[in-house]
Image: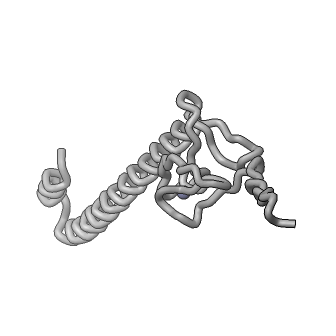
Amino acid sequence: MDLKEILSIINSIANPEDGIKLKEFIQNLEDKIHNLREDNLKLQEQILKYKKEIDKAKDYKKTLEKYSFIKKYGIYSHRETGEYFCPACLLNKDNQIEAPLKAEESGWRCPYNSNHYFNNPDWRPPKTVYDTSPWIS
Ligand SMILES: [Zn+2]
């Protein structure tokens, strides 16, 4: 039974004054139902938004699990390939990127952001080759 049916029944049994009061009461209820439906829609949108955020967080964690952190170098290493990856890009929660680092002479650089540079603490500058020419005295 919907509200219109209830209203017609009320109209048929109530005296005119009571009918007007009841109509107002029902109108009030209809307004409330309308507002509740709108609230419900907003809540559903929020739930969807949070579900997406949860999925994103799960993906983020799952991606990180593929790597192990090398404390000594401050970078990540892929557990299967052993390849080095940029920690700044891997740890970026808003835009996680799996960026394989490019080896340079004294460290590694990120292909996505050249400011992401990581020194290799094992690197030593090459020894200067002294001229051993016998002509120099
Ligand atoms: Zn990077």
Q: Position of residue 124 (x, y in %)?
A: 77, 52
Q: Nearer the viewer, residue 121 or 50?
A: 121
Q: Nearer the viewer, residue 105 or 102?
A: 105
Q: Position of residue 5 (x, y in %)?
A: 14, 51
What colouring method underlies this structural image?
one colour
Residue 126 visible in this rendered orientation of the protein: yes
Ligand 1 position by quadrant = bottom right
Residue 18 visible in this rendered orientation of the protein: no
Q: Quadrant of the C terminus?
A: bottom right
Q: In the image, 110: left or right of 1? A: right
Q: In the image, 33: left or right of 2? A: right
Q: How many marks?
A: 0
Q: Nearer the viewer, residue 29 or 108?
A: 108
Above or below residue 35? Residue 87 is above
Q: Residue at point 20% right, 66% down?
A: 19
Q: For residue 11, which quarter of the picture?
A: bottom left
Q: Residue at point 79% right, 63% down?
A: 135
Q: Residue at point 61% right, 51% down?
A: 87
Q: Quadrant of the N terminus?
A: top left
Residue furthest to the top in view is: 80
